[in-house]
Amino acid sequence: MKDFSNFLDVAFTITFVIAYYQVLMVYLSINVFNRDGVIKILAYFDHLVTDRKCEISEIRQRIFRCLLTGLGSVGFLVNCYDLAVTNFTAPMLFLIPGIPQDSIFLRPVNIIFQVTLYFATMGMIIISDAVIMIMIMYIQAELLSITELLSHLDIEQIHLSKSFWHTYFHKLLAIMMYLCFTFFTFQSINSSIILAVLIAISEVWEVFILCYFGQIIRNASEAMSVALYMSKWYLMDVADQKNLLMLMLRFKYPFKVETFGFGVISIYTFVQVLITTNYFFNDYLGYNTTYLSDL
């Protein structure tokens, strides 16, 4: 039997590359190509952040502390497990090149750098997800409250749709590759099944969150269309009837988040991602088993 340790190193390397690919593409989509639109939307929430007297302030802070504690605990456990596996050398299962194995700096440099790198990467991914959810909740609120600036809605929708198109495409593609390489890695080495399950659950949960917010924005838009259609237009003045007609024409087609290869983002997209990932993994696993048996 040949030694396939090099393939495992490549798998880990590709996993890290995918993680930073996601971070880079989301950063470019939000902070570079759509910076003005995102800042304009986030400015709407400035008073919620600065106003300490609002009722939601305490709830927001409590939820934030719970999430921060939970994510910090998960990161601490993952790093501790990896340290135990690597004899307290590599929290992210790789060594910084150029440091000799017998050097006294091997462990402190690798541990400090890799732990910092792990939490920085996790923080950037979480922040990008939070920005997406904030933007979607903002649009949902706009759809549920009829705005007077109807002529500007189409322009805003086009810009935001492009932003969602790029962001969702890169995130869903990266998550599918995460799952494939995670399954491959833990199928190829003698590792704890608990760690593999935790990683898979976290990635599946991220897909579900993205697809769920795509679903609720579509539901809110469709509810707006139905509410306008069922309104008592015959009791309105002629001017109000004209405004209502413009709104009905505008909301005839519901707002939805779309991206290349996945179509409209909804709960069905979540099922598609899981089925597609499982299909590619089983196909690769069958090919890998056949290849190893031939050796």
Image (cartoon, helix red, strand yellow):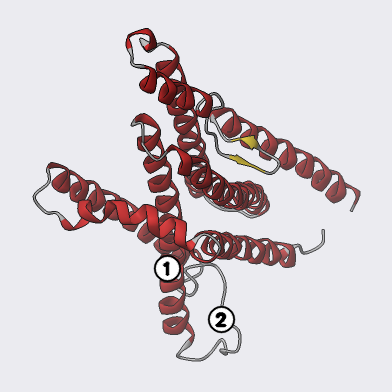
User: Residue 96 shows which numbered tag?
Assistant: 2
Answer above or below: position of 133 versus 20.
above
Identify the image quadrant of residue 12.
Answer: bottom right
Please tell me which residue is depicted at 82% across the width and 62% down the height of the picture. Answer: 2
Image coordinates for residue 94, horizontal then vertical, percent = 57, 72
Image coordinates for residue 265, horizontal then vertical, percent = 57, 35
> Judging from the image, what secondary structure is the residue with disc 2 in?
loop
Q: Nearer the viewer, residue 206 or 201?
A: 206
> Judging from the image, what secondary structure is the residue with disc 1 in?
helix
User: Residue 120 shows which numbered tag?
Assistant: 1
Amino acid type, residue under disc 2 in the picture: Ile
Image coordinates for residue 28, horizontal then vertical, percent = 56, 64
* Image side of residue 253 versus residue 68, left or right: right
Observer able to see residue 19: yes
Answer above or below: position of 217 versus 294.
above
Q: Mark 2: few, some, or many residues within 10 Å (few <14, many ≥20)?
A: few
Q: Give how far apart the Cα atoms at labels 2 and 1 are.
A: 17 Å
* Image side of residue 285 versus residue 167, left or right: right
Q: Nearer the viewer, residue 166 or 15?
A: 166
| Residue furthest front in the image | 238
